[in-house]
Amino acid sequence: MSKSNIEPQKVHKMQLWNDFKNILNTSSNHILINEKNEYGNILEKLGVNENSTLGQIVINTAGILVDNTIRVYANGNDIDMCNIYHFNLELEQYLGNQRLVIADDIFGGLFALNKEASQSIKEEIWYFAPDTLEWENLEINYKEFIDWISGNSMNEFYSTFKWSDFYKDVKDIKFNQGILIYPFLWSNECNIEAADKNIVPFSELITLNLEYKEKFNM
């Protein structure tokens, strides 16, 4: 392939990423983008196109933190829970391999794309809600998800999950941690202001939620 054919492709990919980055950087929400240039063969393992929105987020970042609430998975290291490939391997014992989890929130919620029987990825994003322990179709694709986390409607989505000192309590939370709220968000006894809140490993939080979902046969 000649240089003249390669350069336009590089320019196109750079423009794609710059467009997505501009959406995030101009958001009224507090968004931290952990940019990263090396990504190995992670897209091949995921079966994701490099020119898709998901592909661009994965290869250009180690993860994205939105308003200290949502963590968007990308190409972080093996320790960080924002590594989309390794975290999905961990979740297979609970979810099987029919979902590709693309983000989580500190309450134990998961955002995921469904897969076809052929393992091709469907566009609609589903949310595992920690207040119902059910999967809910958000009826948006990944590009619209990036628009959503950059807009005001995200704050409305979490309005019943947050308490008066929320931002003070979570300001130092790490990518691999979550907030365990007790009584649980899904229980009738939960009063978000009065409930106990503890920072725990995120793996502990999501395991707890998924085990209760299985226990209740939901």
Image (cartoon, rainbow, N blue to C red):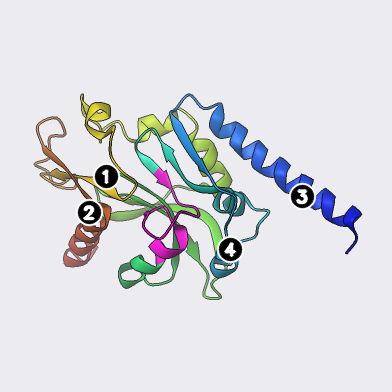
> Does any portion of residue 23 appear in the rendered image?
yes
Whole-Å distance between the Cαs marked 2 and 1? Answer: 8 Å
Label 2 or label 3, whichever lies nearer to me, is 3
- Reading the image, the residue beneath label 3 is 10
Q: Is residue 136 magenta?
A: no
Does residue 141 appear anywhere in the picture? Answer: no
Q: From the viewer's perspective, tell me whether residue 56 is left or right of residue 113.
A: right
Quarter holding residue 198: top left
**Amino acid type at mark 3:** Lys
Q: Nearer the viewer, mark 1 or mark 3?
A: 3
Give the extent of the magenta segment.
Answer: 71-88
Would you place residue 74 above or below residue 189 in this image?
below
Single out the mark in the foreground, 2 or 4: 4
Tag 2's secondary structure? helix
Q: Is residue 34 above or below residue 176?
A: above
Nearest to the observer: residue 17 or residue 124: 17
Q: Are marks 4 and 1 in contact (CB under 8 Å)?
A: no
Residue 107: which numbered mark, if any?
Answer: 1
Counting from the top left corner in percent of width and height, residue 94 is at: 30, 68
Asked if labels 1 and 2 touch by Cβ distance under 8 angstroms, the answer is: no
The residue identified by callout 2 is 205
Quarter of the figure with residue 20: top right
Q: Can you identify the residue that label 4 sits on?
A: 40
Q: Amino acid at mark 4?
A: Gly
Tell whether position 86 is magenta. Answer: yes
Q: Main secondary structure of the magenta part?
A: loop
Q: Is residue 16 left or right of residue 41?
A: right
- 2 or 1: tag closer to the N-terminus: 1
